[in-house]
Image: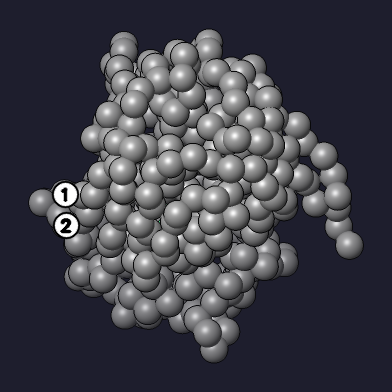
């Protein structure tokens, strides 16, 4: 059997100092996709050199795009133009990355060649009907398993996609982005309406590549009329990676940290809003705009957190941060209640069940519900928890160590490499006593 990575975190600790967490995963994926379809050479800096974004990069290399790097987060993408991708010789393997698979399904539906998308065990269990059904309405031909999961067999339907008006049943940036990418190859206008705001990196980056994209209230629209002009992209640090230390410094008495150059796009800052509602001390410093995305340094000092009912409007804006927010809730005074977050059940793992199981193992009163969790704040105990191969669960339980009564052992942590390979180094430098071993 393949070796698995186990993390062990000692109880206690204080976080101090400055850190720059790696590049934003969502923006890194999109930089490869749009840079590849552009005319001319796109230079990217701050690219996330982690498995998920590298899966997207490899997929475009497999479709004939010449991409130099990454070297210290720098890439040079020799764009082939909207019609310039070549048929891949084999299935495109996308590892653990839902974003790669869902966005690529839209992009590939309108190409002149067939393609197959595959992924690892977790990705092969994740729902793909949310993209294949609206794509079918556009005229796409995509075969899934009976359960609506990968592998996806995509027929190239160049010239045969039709724009649609689609009201998304769930707030999903991946579905929105998938349809916008398909809309770049469809006849007429494709309009996507979202039930609540979701991350808008695709729309911002399309505009950065001078591609026309419309926005009216909750509707985004696009058509095939346009070309992408190569540009320069500076990827900000990922607020979803920063989130572990936003919580860590908030819960560990005496902490004081500054996280540099963090993306604070308002469609991503739910974690700051939720922590502030809980009483955290987070100061936004040096706000600036870099390549169309707002960026700032975030200073965090320890606070006395209290339990809250998390406003449902903030859920899509913090969707990836709930594993670590549950840890914050376990350290707060009183009860925290999350509702309206059933999407958490279909992430890299069932994040409601897996976090509830782990928190209960550590002695926390955490009750899962179909669409969220109810957590009574109090102490965190010691113990061994399972991450189920989910990167964000592994990192969330590492942060729990700061307030635990004894060591926490976390199993199956190798997928931390999908989003944040430097996690251990940065966590140790800031003051977490975390070690890593192989089983
Ligand atoms: C992402 C969108 C979100 C998020 C994921 C990245 C993106 O997924 O959870 O980690 O880059 O568009 P959903 O769109 O499924 O909510």
Task: List x then y, in percent, for residue 9.
Answer: 68, 34
Verify CB contact (< 8 Å) between mark 2 and mark 1: yes
Front in this rendered view, residue 423 or 431: 431
Q: Residues within 10 Å of mark 2 (few under 14, many from 20)?
A: some
The residue singled out by tag 1 in the image is 215
> In the image, what residue occupies the spot 16% across and 49% down?
215
Which residue is pictured at 89% across the width and 62% down the height?
1
Q: Secondary structure at mark 2?
A: strand
Q: Is the distance from the Cβ of mark 2 to the nearest ligand 1 atom less than 8 Å?
A: no
Tell me if residue 85 can be seen: no
Residue 347 coordinates in the image, percent (x, y): 49, 60
Q: Is residue 254 left or right of residue 177?
A: right
- Depicted 98 relative to depicted 314: above or below: below
Instruction: Return the mark for residue 219.
Output: 2
Residue at point 49% right, 29% down? 248
Q: Dot 1, crowdedness within 10 Å: few (<14), some or many (≥20)?
A: few
Asked whether residue 267 is in view, the answer is yes
- How many numbered badges does the structure rendering display? 2
Figure quadrant of residue 366: bottom left
| Residue in front for this viewpoint, 187 or 207 | 207
Residue extending farthest to the left is 217
- Across and down, in percent, residue 4 comes to 80, 51
Assess mark 1: CB under 8 A from ligand 1?
no
């Amino acid at each position: 059997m393949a070796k698995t990575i186990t993390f062990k975190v000692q109880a206690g600790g204080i976080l101090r100092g400055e850190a720059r967490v790696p590049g934003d995963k969502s923006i890194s994926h999109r930089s490869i996709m749009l840079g590849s379809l552009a005319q001319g050479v796109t230079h990217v800096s701050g690219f996330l050199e982690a498995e998920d974004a590298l899966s997207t990069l490899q997929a475009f290399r497999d479709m004939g795009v010449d991409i130099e790097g990454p070297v210290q987060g720098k890439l040079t993408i020799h764009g082939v133009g909207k019609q310039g991708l070549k048929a891949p010789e084999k299935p495109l393997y996308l590892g653990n990355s839902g974003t790669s698979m869902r966005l690529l399904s839209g992009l590939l539906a309108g190409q002149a060649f067939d393609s197959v998308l595959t992924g690892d065990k977790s990705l092969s269990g994740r729902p793909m009907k949310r993209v294949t059904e609206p794509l079918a309405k556009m005229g796409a031909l995509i075969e899934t398993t009976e359960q609506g999961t990968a592998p996806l067999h995509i027929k190239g339907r160049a010239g045969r996609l039709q724009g649609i008006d689609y009201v998304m049943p769930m707030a999903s940036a991946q579905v929105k982005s998938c349809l916008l990418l398909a809309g770049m190859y469809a006849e007429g206008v494709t309009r996507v309406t979202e039930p609540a705001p979701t991350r808008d990196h695709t729309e911002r980056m399309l505009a950065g590549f001078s591609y026309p994209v419309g926005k009216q209230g909750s509707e985004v629209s696009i058509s095939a009329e346009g070309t992408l002009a190569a540009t320069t992209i500076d990827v900000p640090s990922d607020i979803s990676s920063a989130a572990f230390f936003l919580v860590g410094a908030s819960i560990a008495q005496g902490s004081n940290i500054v996280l540099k150059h963090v993306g604070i796009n308002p469609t991503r800052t739910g974690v700051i809003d939720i922590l502030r509602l809980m009483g955290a001390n987070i100061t936004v410093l040096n706000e600036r705009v870099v390549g169309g995305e707002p960026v700032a340094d975030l200073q965090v000092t320890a606070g006395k957190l209290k339990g809250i009912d998390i406003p449902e409007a903030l859920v899509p804006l913090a969707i990836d941060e709930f594993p670590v927010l549950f840890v914050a809730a376990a350290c707060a005074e009183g009860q925290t209640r999350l509702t309206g977050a059933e999407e958490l059940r279909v992430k890299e793992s069932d994040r409601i069940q897996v976090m509830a199981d782990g928190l209960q193992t550590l002695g926390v009163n955490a009750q899962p519900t179909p669409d969220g969790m109810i957590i009574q704040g109090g102490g965190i105990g010691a113990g061994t928890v399972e991450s189920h191969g989910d990167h964000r669960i592994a990192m969330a339980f590492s942060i729990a160590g700061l307030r635990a009564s004894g060591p926490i052992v976390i199993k199956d942590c190798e997928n931390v490499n999908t989003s944040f390979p430097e996690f251990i180094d940065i966590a140790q430098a800031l003051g977490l006593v975390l070690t890593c071993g192989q089983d």
